[in-house]
């Protein structure tokens, strides 16, 4: 395999929990060589655009979705899943904000198992105990793999086997998400919170910038990526009058002005007197920063039933932005995904696509096939919708119900940056579509897609006699890349739902699949890493798959299962179905590079020297053995054992623990949960 390492200016892949972080740099190798050969700059680095405009309506000085009853309880994460907790919490709030009934807390561990490496080697290159990336939850939700309720998949007791055997379907599927960053107007972010209940954001959670137990402020913009401790939260409110003096203990000192964001965290309710909520200064330089990947508001969703069907050629979402032309060239390109529309689900209701082509004109088409590929004859294309890309992120287009012909057909999104660049020549707005494409960091592969020929195409609308071309051919011919990617364009069809949410799970033909072994670590680090807005793609599996199973693009419920074995699988009519195409297994690229290490926060209980999760006489005995040189404490055991914080673990510490075990009160905070950033 000709694998050319990518040098993409990928920024920090933040750990979406209290601080595991990873510096990732990815992009195609030697763009200069590619440009010299083709005259094109095919792939653009993702960057969320923040040019949203406030409505200028008067906003209150204080607002809290918590006070409005639009949040569920604060929880304690036990894996590196802040990315799941923060995003699912915002989805809960969106549903509550829309007065949905019987909303329960969602299951982050289900999203966690979904986001691990599949048995065919594709997907996110991580185990369930590893840090994660910011765009894993966007892929999870926009592919309708989840969410499921915590009651159906408990965080601390659910296993890989439970995940593999689960046959429940989600009740809701995300269709829209608006990207924001730290250049976004503050009033726009407030309006998003007012309209949808919250936004998902990341920040530098280094405790040296914490004042008391409730107020974060980091004003140091010079920090390098190795000094950042990324963490994902749900921002649920603000207070313009929150005193700047509340941040005076921060390593950055006191900000210049009052005002702060209210965030719902995932470190438990006992960590401070706000029940696990925190305030982050408006002047914090890292909150909403692109270095952690995009921040976003979840803005719309589908209520799922047996007659709502999602056609998609990837399940992991957009990991990158694909552009056929260079930044400076004004062009119109149609990006196309091919689908096999079934007889039962042919009433097109909506089209979803991801793009950062802010301000560009776009049109959505149904494109019939001409032989084995979508037709290049635009006279036979049916225009379904036309508008302007007015925000970056996942865009949902509401089509006037259109009956589609049975069989192979395609959905095209024609995007033009000509007008916007002529109106603002200095803008050089990129004509782009989200793509589920492979990603690499200094430690090797981060994400490997299931891309294959026959799923995604493009057509240069400005070139005379242009043909519809398979994007995999472009990757191979112009980039020497045989891994490639798949465009993030999805089609939603709808028939009348008889019952909104079937109580019985859809039955499918059993599939024998291989599952990746997940090492069930007992580490309780609440840290996790989030990656750039990466759109991962799963190949459309030419079968109808019940969304109830969170899986690779096949009908299996385990994202680790091989999709190559499912090409002939037959399924019964499921509740809310997803279609994808068969995938062949891929070979891992062999090139790796050196890069930054992951810094993971360590959460422990003071006095729990054996790290068992309880403070008891066994801990005192271990310390006594260590003091007598009969046992050796690891660095983490030593931290927990040194209860009086005198940088030694000895008989004094053991005595405090013995008193604690005997319920004798001491002046040392034995039993308190602590966090250490390594």
Image: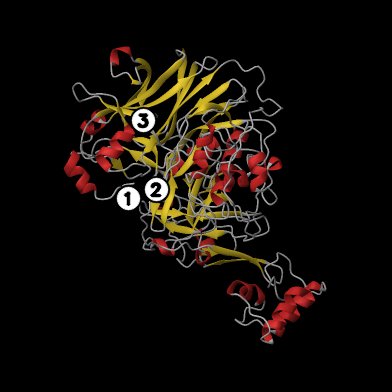
The percent position of residue 327, horizontal first and vertical second, equals 24, 39
CB of mark 1 within 8 Å of CB of mark 2? yes
Task: State which mark lies toward you, 3 or 1.
Answer: 1
Give the Cα separation between the discs numbered 2 and 3. 26 Å
Between discs 2 and 3, the one toward the N terminus: 3
Between discs 1 and 2, the one toward the N terminus: 1
Q: Name the residue under label 1.
A: 6
Using the image as rendered, state which of residue 624 and residue 249 is in the foreground. Answer: 624
Return the mark for residue 389: 3
Q: How crowded is mark 2: few (under 14 residues within 10 Å), some or many (20 or more)?
A: many
Q: What element carries label 1?
A: loop
Q: What element carries label 2?
A: strand
Is residue 584 found left or right of 116 in the rendered image?
Answer: left
Task: Let me know if residue 229 appears in the view.
Answer: yes
Asked if 193 appears above or below 210 in the picture, the reply is above
Is residue 635 found left or right of 472 in the rendered image?
Answer: right
């Amino acid at each position: 395999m000709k694998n050319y390492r990518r040098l993409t200016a990928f920024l920090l892949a933040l750990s979406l929990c209290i601080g595991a972080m990873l510096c990732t740099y990815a992009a195609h190798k030697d763009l200069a060589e590619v440009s010299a050969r083709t005259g094109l700059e095919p792939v653009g680095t993702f960057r969320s655009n923040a040019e949203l405009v406030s409505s200028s309506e008067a906003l209150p000085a204080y607002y809290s979705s918590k006070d409005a009853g639009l949040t569920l309880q604060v929880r304690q994460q036990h894996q590196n899943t802040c990315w799941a907790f923060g995003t699912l919490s915002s989805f809960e709030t969106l549903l509550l904000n829309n007065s949905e009934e019987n909303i329960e807390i969602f299951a982050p561990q289900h999203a966690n198992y979904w986001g691990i490496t599949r048995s065919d080697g594709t997907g996110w290159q991580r185990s369930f105990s590893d840090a994660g990336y910011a765009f894993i939850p966007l892929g999870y939700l926009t592919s309708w793999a989840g969410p499921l309720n915590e009651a159906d998949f408990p965080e601390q007791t659910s296993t890989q086997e439970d995940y593999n055997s689960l046959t429940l379907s989600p009740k809701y599927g995300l269709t829209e998400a608006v990207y924001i960053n730290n250049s976004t107007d503050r009033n726009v972010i407030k309006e998003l919170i007012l309209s949808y209940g919250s936004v998902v954001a990341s920040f530098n959670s280094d405790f040296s910038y914490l004042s008391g137990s409730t107020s974060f402020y980091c004003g140091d913009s010079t920090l390098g990526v190795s000094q950042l401790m990324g963490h994902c939260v749900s921002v649920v409110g603000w207070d313009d009058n929150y005193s700047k003096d509340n941040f005076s203990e921060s390593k950055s000192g006191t900000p210049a002005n009052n005002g702060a964001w209210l965030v719902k965290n995932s470190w438990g309710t006992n960590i401070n007197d706000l029940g696990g909520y925190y305030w982050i200064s408006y002047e914090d330089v890292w909150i909403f920063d692109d270095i952690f990947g995009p921040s976003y508001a979840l803005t719309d969703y589908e209520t799922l039933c047996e007659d709502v069907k999602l056609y998609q050629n990837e399940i992991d979402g957009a990991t990158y932005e694909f552009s056929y032309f260079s930044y400076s060239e004004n062009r119109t390109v149609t990006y196309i995904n091919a689908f096999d529309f079934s007889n039962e689900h042919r009433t097109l209701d909506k089209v979803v696509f991801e793009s950062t082509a802010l301000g560009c004109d776009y049109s959505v088409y149904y494109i019939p096939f001409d032989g084995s590929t979508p037709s290049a004859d635009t006279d036979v294309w049916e225009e379904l919708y036309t508008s302007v890309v007015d925000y970056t992120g996942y865009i949902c287009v509401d089509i006037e119900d259109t009956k589609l012909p049975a069989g192979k057909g395609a959905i095209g999104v024609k995007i033009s940056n000509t007008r916007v660049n002529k109106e603002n020549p200095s803008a050089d707005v990129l004509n782009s579509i989200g793509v589920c494409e492979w990603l690499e960091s200094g430690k090797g592969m981060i994400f490997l897609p299931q891309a294959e020929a026959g799923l995604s195409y493009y057509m240069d609308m400005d070139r005379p006699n242009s043909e519809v071309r398979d994007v995999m051919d472009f990757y191979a011919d112009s980039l020497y890349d045989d891994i490639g990617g798949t465009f993030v364009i999805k089609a939603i069809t709808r028939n009348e739902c008889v019952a909104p949410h079937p109580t019985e799970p859809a039955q499918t033909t059993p599939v024998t699949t291989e599952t990746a072994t997940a090492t069930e670590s007992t580490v309780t680090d609440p840290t996790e890493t989030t990656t750039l807005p990466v759109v991962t793609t799963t190949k459309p599996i030419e079968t109808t798959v019940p969304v109830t199973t969170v899986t690779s693009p096949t009908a299996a419920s385990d994202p680790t299962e091989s999709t190559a074995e499912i090409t002939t699988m037959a399924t019964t009519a499921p509740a809310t179905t997803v279609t994808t195409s068969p995938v062949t297994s891929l070979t891992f690229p062999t090139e790796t590079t050196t890069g930054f290490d992951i810094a993971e926060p360590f959460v422990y209980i003071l006095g729990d020297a054996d790290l068992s999760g309880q403070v008891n006489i066994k801990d005192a005995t271990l310390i006594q053995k260590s003091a007598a040189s009969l046992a050796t404490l690891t660095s983490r055991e030593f931290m927990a054992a040194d209860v009086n914080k005198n940088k030694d673990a000895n008989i004094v510490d053991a005595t405090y623990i013995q008193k604690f075990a005997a319920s004798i009160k001491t002046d040392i905070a034995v039993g308190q949960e602590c966090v250490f950033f390594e």
